[in-house]
Image: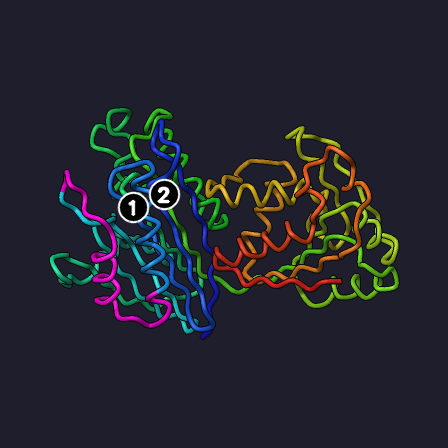
């Protein structure tokens, strides 16, 4: 059995901190994917550095087949020791999923991962194994379509302390939310954001720790195709549009000129929605057979900025950038058809230079999506 899975990540900094001390890293090759949730010691810049190093080292070593013991020892030897607490590095949860559905979960001092399968909710505590002076817990999994895995930092289970929940949300509270309050039919991203929203609510809007939820939803592969920009040569318009409608895939168009080309060649009407939920983002449009039509460079640039920030929140947002990002995160394999013809409007004096470089923005978007475990490629025209 070959499986696919969707990853949702929602993080929020501790109150009054600029950087998040929780970091999620994703590494992928042709055989498996490794997802690392690392919680750095303390908070702020120091915690972010510790968590980033842990996530990068663990993910890149394990995806290359390095044994867990060697990876943990490398982390211990690489990261500095806190002079106050005499602790070396961050806590972590590592999930490796192979294409045949076999999963391997490693946890060190993070709250136990939770598996939801056919209505049952199970905390995965794993078998204890000592590496150096640290107790690591390991679990071997056989994943099935429909399974949902939830990884979280202790900011989730501690949410509500000194606010609405004297003892915090705790593991039992998170299980209750997943059973009773959260719609598990939603995408992985929306489930992760729901968990974070409850944490913020129980904390009266002031999180006392960096808080992160990672949701992995096992399901059939979803393929998508994005078209943006007219081809360099006008005689390639038809070729590009034909490629856009090939196969059974979800479809999105980014750019007014691109939408007009498709409309003209396929005789499909374009209906613009003039409701602005964000005045800085142009409105979206609809076209039969296409999931979404957005403006081009401004919308794409905002999507890239949201991904780069690491603080992705798309729930209930109706602007074009949030809708496009939600669409992208729901797809597993994405092909981008990118036209290289220069739009004269992007050369207007005073417009930020990077906005004129559609190809650069889409290349950056491609890279960011690949970093989140998507399989993306660009076909230039």
Q: Nearer the viewer, mark 2 or mark 1?
A: 1
Question: In terms of secondary structure, where does tag 1 sit?
Answer: strand
Question: In terms of secondary structure, where does tag 2 sit?
Answer: strand
**Against 180, is 234 above or below?**
below
Residue 81 drawn at (x, y percent): 18, 47
In the displayed orientation, state which residue is furthest to the left: 133
**Against 294, is 316 above or below?**
above
Query: Label 2, on which residue?
Result: 212
Residue at x 28%, y 25% (from the top left corner)? 164
Residue at x 20%, y 32% (from the top left corner)? 167
Q: CA distance from mark 2 to mark 1?
A: 9 Å
Is residue 317 one of those drawn in magenta? no
Residue 40 drawn at (x, y percent): 28, 44
Q: Residues within 10 Å of mark 2 (few under 14, many from 20)?
A: many
Residue at x 55%, y 53% (from the top left corner)? 330
Residue 369 shown left or right of residue 151 in the figure: right
Residue 40 shown left or right of residue 320 in the figure: left
**Against 19, is 166 above or below?**
above
Tag 2 near tag 1, CB within 8 Å: yes
Query: Label 1, on which residue?
Result: 39
Of 221 and 265, nearer the camera is: 265
Q: Quadrant of the N terminus?
A: bottom left
- The boundaries of the magenta stretch are 61-85
Residue 290 drawn at (x, y percent): 72, 53
Q: Residues within 10 Å of mark 1 (few under 14, many from 20)?
A: many
Question: Which sits earlier in the primary sequence, circle 2 or circle 1?
Answer: 1
């Amino acid at each position: 059995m070959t499986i696919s899975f969707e990853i949702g990540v929602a993080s929020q900094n501790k109150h009054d901190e600029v950087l998040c001390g929780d970091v999620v890293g994703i590494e992928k090759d042709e055989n498996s994917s490794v997802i690392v949730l690392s919680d750095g010691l303390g908070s702020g810049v120091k915690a972010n550095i510790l968590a980033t190093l842990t996530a990068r080292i663990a993910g890149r070593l394990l995806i290359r087949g390095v044994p867990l013991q060697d990876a943990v020892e490398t982390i211990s030897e690489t990261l500095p020791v806190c002079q106050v607490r005499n602790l070396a590095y961050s806590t972590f949860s590592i999930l490796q999923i192979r294409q045949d559905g076999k999963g391997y979960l490693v946890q060190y001092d993070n709250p136990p991962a939770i598996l939801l399968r056919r209505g049952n909710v199970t905390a995965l505590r794993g078998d204890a194994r000592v590496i150096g002076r640290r107790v690591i817990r390991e679990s071997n999994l056989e994943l099935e379509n429909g399974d949902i895995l939830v990884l979280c930092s202790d900011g989730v289970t501690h949410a509500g302390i000194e606010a609405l929940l004297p003892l915090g949300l705790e593991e039992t509270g998170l299980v209750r939310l997943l059973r009773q309050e959260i719609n598990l039919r939603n995408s992985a991203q929306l489930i992760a954001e729901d968990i974070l929203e409850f944490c913020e609510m129980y904390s009266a809007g002031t999180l006392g720790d960096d808080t992160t939820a990672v949701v992995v939803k096992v399901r059939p592969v979803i393929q998508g195709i994005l078209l943006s920009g007219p081809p360099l040569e006008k005689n390639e318009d038809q070729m590009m549009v034909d490629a856009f409608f090939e196969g059974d895939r979800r479809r999105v168009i980014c750019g007014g000129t691109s939408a007009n080309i498709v409309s003209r060649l396929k005789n499909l009407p374009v209906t613009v929605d003039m409701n602005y939920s964000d005045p800085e983002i142009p409105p979206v449009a609809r076209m039969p057979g296409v999931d979404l039509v957005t403006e081009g460079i401004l919308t794409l640039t905002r999507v890239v900025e949201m991904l780069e920030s690491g603080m992705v929140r798309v729930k209930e947002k109706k602007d074009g950038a949030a809708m496009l990002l939600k669409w992208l995160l729901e797809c597993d394999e994405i092909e981008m058809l990118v036209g290289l013809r220069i739009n004269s409007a992007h050369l207007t004096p005073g417009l930020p230079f990077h906005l004129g470089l559609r190809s650069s923005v889409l290349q950056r978007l491609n890279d960011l999506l690949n970093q989140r475990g998507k399989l993306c490629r660009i076909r230039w025209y």
